[in-house]
Amino acid sequence: MADYRKLLVENDGPVTIITINRPEVRNALDNETAADLAMALRAFDGASGQAVAVLTGAGGHFCAGADLKELAASRDYKPWAGDPDGPCHDLLSKPVIAAVAGYACAGGLGIALRCDLRVAEESSTFAVLSRRWGIPMSDGTTVRLPRLIGAGRALDMLLTARKVSGAEAVAMGLADRLVPTGQALQKAVELAREIAAFPQIALRSDRMSAIRQWNLSEQDAIALETRLSLEARQKEARLGAGRFASGAGRHGRIEKD
């Protein structure tokens, strides 16, 4: 496993836990940490024994965005989504869950949005606070946020810099689970284990179809779904149907591989 100076990476069975470890700046990403995060996510995606990643931050905050002190002293300002080496660029083949405590603001919001699911603590805060400083969102937020919560709500956040609580984030679809303060990581790991226990070929093909269908016609999207589901239909579906027929799914009981 790679040695990252400002990230902590550990494997908990099939779950990879990636922790941004700069609590003194609410886990703001300097260039080094942003590059390491991109590499850590790619390493997880290429690891055969790992099924789901959980992305979190140390010290009670998820990520406060880019390190503005470094930005003020440097001209090296790469877009996190548009740059091939940015932490919000790659479309991974496996799901990532954000465990959001404290602030997920500016670029930290973008980091949360690049994840598949977001588990938010009641005291968490989502916001585009970079609006105050004239810093544009170059982390995919202007694309992913309106696709997730709708244009009106996204523009409200993008134009006003208002803070959205964990409860409101769940209500508007920005977050997927609301948990008590201090429990985001625990609950995200539990969710990751549940997802990792399912047959993975079908799970990943369904996920990829849902992600890639946005700019396709319905007919083309269904054709893509058909292509992506081929391996699971050949390798997992008959075995799963056989388990069900033998009684594995009776009385609401689901046995997972």
Image: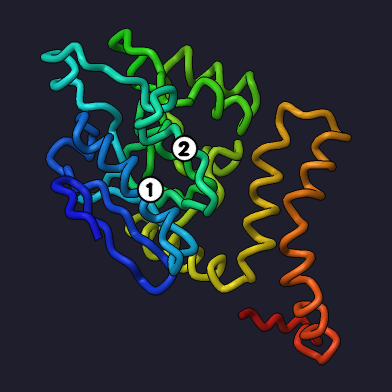
- Judged from the image, the secondary structure of the residue bearing numbered disc 2 is loop
Q: How many neighbours does mark 1 have within 10 angstroms: few (below 14), some (14-19), or many (20 or more)? A: many
Do callouts 1 and 2 mark residues in contact (Cβ within 8 Å)? yes
User: What residue do we see at 49% from left, 70% from top?
Assistant: 193
Residue under the image location 77 percent in, 85 percent down: 243
* Residue 46 percent location from the top left of the image: 43, 55
Q: Quadrant of residue 129?
A: top left
> Relative to 38, is 147 on the left or the right?
right
Placement of the N terminus among the 4 image quadrants: bottom left
From this view, report whether residue 77 is shown above or below residue 86. Answer: above
Q: Amino acid at mark 2?
A: Asp
Q: Secondary structure at mark 1?
A: helix
- The three-letter code of the residue at mark 1 reads Leu
- Looking at the picture, tell me which residue is in the foreground, 7 or 69: 7
The residue sitting at 33% across, 67% down in the picture is 11
Q: Which residue is mark 2?
A: 90
User: Residue 187, percent across and down?
Assistant: 44, 63
Position of residue 205 relative to residue 139, above or below, is below
Toward the viewer: 2 or 249? 2
Quarter of the image with the C terminus is: bottom right
Query: Could you say which quadrant of the image residue 123 lies in?
Result: top left
- 103 left or right, relative to 240: left
Picture layout, residue 120 above or below residue 38 = below
Q: Earlier in the sequence, mark 1 or mark 2?
A: 1
